[in-house]
Image (spheres, coloured by chain):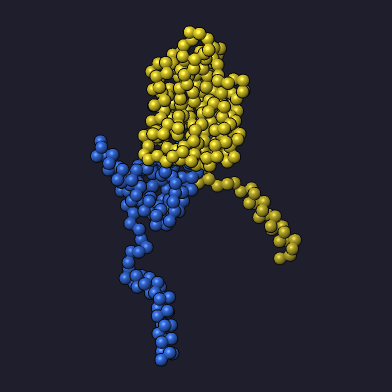
Amino acid sequence: MNKFMAKIVVLIFALVLLSPFVVNAVRGVMGSSATAIDLVLPESGECVKDKEYMRANHMDILKEARVKTVRDGVRIKDYSLKNCQTCHTNRDEFCDRCHNYVGVKPECFECHHFPTSKERKERCEGN
Amino acid sequence: MERRDFLKLGGIVAAAGAVAPASSLLYASKVESKNGNKYGMVIDLTKCDGCGECVSACRTANNVATFPDEKINNHLLRIAHVKSKFPNSQEQAIPLMCMHCDNPPCVHVCPVKASFVRKDGIVLIDKHRCIGCRYCMVACPYKARSFVFKHHEGSSNPEVPKTMHGVVEKCEFCVSRVDHGQLPVCVETCKKGVMSFGNLNDKDSQVSRLITSGRVHRVREDLHLGAKVYYLGL
């Protein structure tokens, strides 16, 4: 009886240990959208550089443009944070959603004005 | 591979690494800012009555927050009311701001090189870099700099970034406006024409002509800091 109990305990332990793998495997088979994030893309679909490049390097572009702007006063409109807003009108549905997903906390928006969809709506109603 | 060959190869790789230029993402050719300009301001105190319109315009345009606690309210531009000790002397209003020195003590003391002088002579703070140590505030003889103590929501002028709490702020001659060919807000607001802003290197500019008239003074000229804000009738 003791041996039987030990077997059951080992089995339960193994199940608990493997449960995350099992759950993920089942999710994968079911085709769940656990990995995809729902971003609201602008209508025009054209950015200053191609999509893949921007996805990987937009932070470096912004950083370099920042240094050039602050230190040398060279203001190139294409690479400014202000220019992003012309197409990406809703910060919360595009920038924030992805930043939250990958777990980064850029501090750009603490000072630089980049309206969320809610703020934009409020302003439109105000006018 | 022999030891000798290995060392040779190592040398070549190191040399190549040293010679290879730092790659730039955006700027293929080195873009220079407008050279040869040196911005300055002349303030005609005989016209100023201290109405304070420039101060409020400055605060709105540069997202300077107003707190109920007067102690932590910052002023990029402020108006001092001065009265001399002679009998029957009248009170004089003097707009004071960052003097944008040629040889600024605030820049020398900054431990992280956040403060710097731009090529056109405007003294700036890289607020991304500032650690809020406030050495510059101690160093500045004009008390032109102030520390943002508290977080504030919203911005009165979304065109310009506001200053985060924990960072030093000061008058920047409205750089973004100047870069786009506009005048600083205080100059534009003043209807009495007290302030004039322009290129000191250009001999025909209004500021240069006022300075060469010989009646201008600077605040604390004895410090030899090369301030670029001049006063008429000081």
Q: Position of residue A59 (x, y in %)?
A: 46, 49
**Residue sitting at x 57%, y 32%:** B138
Q: Residue at x 61, y 23 (%)?
A: B223
Q: In the rendered image, is residue B150 in sight?
A: yes
**Up-down: is B102 above or below A8?**
above
Q: Is residue A54 above or below residue B3?
A: above
Q: Position of residue A90 (x, y in %)?
A: 33, 47
Judge by depth and name the residue closer to the eye, A74 or A124. A124
Residue at image position (48%, 48%) is A60
Residue in front for this viewpoint, B177 or A127: A127
In the image, what residue occupies the spot 32% across and 52% down? A40
| Position in image of residue B209 (x %, y %) | 51, 14
State which quarter of the image contains the N terminus of chain B: bottom right
Give the residue at the far right of this rendering: B4
Asked where in the image residue A38 lies, by quadrant, the reply is: bottom left
Picture quadrant where residue B219 is located: top right
Specify the colour of chain B: yellow
Pick the residue in front: A51 or B134: B134
Image position of B32 (left or right of A7): right
User: Does the image show residue B188?
Assistant: no
Q: Position of residue A73 (x, y in %)?
A: 49, 34
Above or below residue B232? Residue A102 is below
Q: Any idea which chain is the blue one in this picture?
A: A
